[in-house]
Amino acid sequence: MKAIMVVGTTSHAGKSFLTAALCRILARRGWRVTPFKGQNMALNAYVTSTGGEIGHAQAVQAWAAGVTPRVEMNPILLKPQGNMTSQIIIKGKAVGTVQATEYYEKYFELGWEVVQESLYRLSLEFDMVVCEGAGSPAEINLKHRDLTNMRVAKHLNAPTILIVDIERGGAFAHVVGTLELLDPQERSLVKGIVINKFRGQKELLDSGITWLEEKTKVPVLGVIPWSHQMFPAEDSLDLLERNRRRSSQDINISVVKLPRIANFTDFDPLEAESSVSVNYVDIQDSLGHPDAVIVPGTKTTIPDLLAMERSGMAEQIRNYAAAGGTVLGICGGYQILGQRIIDPEGFEGESGEFTALNLLPVTTILSPNKIARQRQVISEFPQAGLPVDGYEIHQGRTRINRRLREENDDYQPIFDDPALGLVDKSQAIWGCYIHGLFDNGAWRRSWLNHLRKQRGMSSLATGISNYRDQREATLNILADIVEKNLDLTTILSNHY
C-alpha cells in the first residue's frame, strides 16, 4: 500500500484538515484511499457501524475519502479525563483508564502491534493511505515511544509533508527547529513543507520561502490562505477561534464550555446556519440572555457538574430555566440536567451520590460498561415523525424517576425510544443522548423554529437536507483550496 504522511510543527497546525483534503483529492482522482492516525488524543469521538469509537476527525477524513469510517483508521484513541489520566480505546473498545507513565509501560508494545495490524488490514482493501501525525514529530522526550508520527512514516517509507501554522508566528523557526530535531532517516522522508493559514499578499512571503528552501533543502509545496471554511477540530483550542468569528444573529445560542467538554463537533451544524450565532461560554463567565443554552457532552460528568456548582454556572442555568429560558443537555449534559448522578464504584473519582441541576426527572448511575452504538429513531418533539440518526457514547445508565402518562404529562419522550431523552411540557428543557442530533436538517430546523417562534420570527424552511450534504460540499471546497495552492507533484511522483 502506498502512503503519504502529514505531520505538523505544532498541534493545531492543520494536519487533520490537510489529511482530509488529500483524501478527497486522491479519491477524486480515482484512488482507493483511506485515512489513518495510529494514536489520537481527543474528546471528539465518533461511533462506527460496528460500535467502535474513533476520533471524529478520522471519521470526517473517511467521508472525505468516500469510504465508511472503521476502527482500523484510528486503532488507538486516548480520552483525557483529568488527574493526568486517560481512558484507553483500542480497536474501538475501552480497555481501561491509566496515567501517562503507566500507559507507555503497559501499552506501548501492544499499541505498536495494533498500529501495524491495522495498517495491514487496510492494505488489503486500499491502495493508498494518508496518515496523520499528532502534535509535533520532534518532541525529543517522547520520540522513543511515539506511535503516531515518524515511526509510522518509517514503517511505510512514506513521503512526508510538514505543515506549519504561520498565523501563530515563528513559522520559519518552527520548521527549521522541527527538521533539525529529526534523525537523518526521518528527515530524508520529509519531501515538502506547507505553510498554512496565511493572511495577506503572498508576494511578501516569497523571500522567506526562498530562504527556507535554501536553508532546509526541502521544497515548499505551497501556501494555503486563511479560510473561514470550518473543519471539525480535535481539541478545544479551536473554540477560541470560533468565538472570535461569531456575531449576533437572529438566534443566539450559548454552549457551556465545560472543563472536559466532549463532542463539541455536535454544534458544527448550528454554526453553519447563517441565522444562528453559537458562543462558547466559560463556566466562570456570565451566561447572559441567549435564546438557548446547551450543556454539551463531557468525558467526566461529575467533576464537571461540581465545577459548574463551584463557579456559579449551575445556579445561572437554574435561574435562566426558571425565567423561561430554553436549555438542552446532550449526553453528559443530559445527565447534568437530571436530579441525581450516582457513581457507586468511584468510576470518575470519588464514589457517591451527587445532586444535579434538577431540571429533568432522571437519575443516572455511572458504570464501567460503556454504551457506544449508532441509533436511528423517529422524533416526537418538536415535530412528530422526523427521522433522526446519530450515535450514543456514554458510561451512565439514565432512568426516568416517574411513570410517563400517555397525554398531558409534564414530560414526554423526544423520540420513539424514551430512553434517549425527555422534554418538558413547555418544550423549554430538553435532554437527550444522541450525538450528531443537529446533523439531521429537518429536526435541527424544527428545533430552531421553536426558538424563532418564541421571538415572534418567521419559520425557516424545514425541508433542508442533512448537514452531511453540506459537509460534503465543504470537503470539496477545502480540497479545491489545497489543489489550487499546493504543488503535489513531488509527493505523488512516486505513486503514479
Image (cartoon, grey):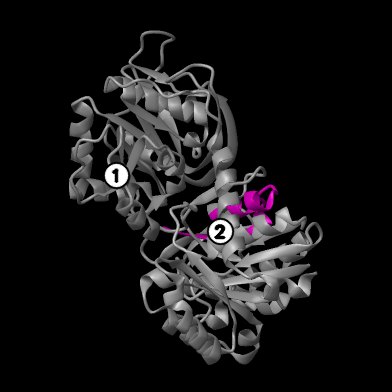
Specify the amino acid type for callout 1: Ser
Task: Name the residue located 44 percent from the left edge and 20 percent from the top edge.
Answer: 381
In this view of the protein, can residue 75 be seen by the observer?
A: no
Dots 1 and 2: beta carbons under 8 Å? no
Residue 285: x %, y % from top left: 19, 49
Q: Is residue 382 left or right of residue 215?
A: left
Q: Is residue 182 left or right of residue 454?
A: right
Q: Is residue 248 left or right of residue 165?
A: left
Task: Name the residue located 42 percent from the left edge and 76 percent from the top edge.
Answer: 204
Mark 1 residue element:
loop
* Residue 485 image label: none
In the depicted structure, whether residue 8 falls above or below residue 251: below
Which residue was labeled with disc 2? 481
Name the quadrant of the N terminus: bottom right
Q: Residues within 10 Å of mark 1 (few under 14, many from 20)?
A: few
Of badges 1 and 2, the one in the foreground is: 2
In this view of the protein, can residue 56 be seen by the observer?
A: yes
Specify the amino acid type for callout 2: Ile
Which residue was labeled with disc 1? 247
Indicate which disc, 1 or 2, sits on the residue closer to the N terminus: 1
Residue 251: x %, y % from top left: 31, 33
Can residue 182 be found in the magenta stretch?
A: no
Task: Name the residue located 47 percent from the left edge and 63 percent from the top edge.
Answer: 225
Magenta part of the chain: 57-81
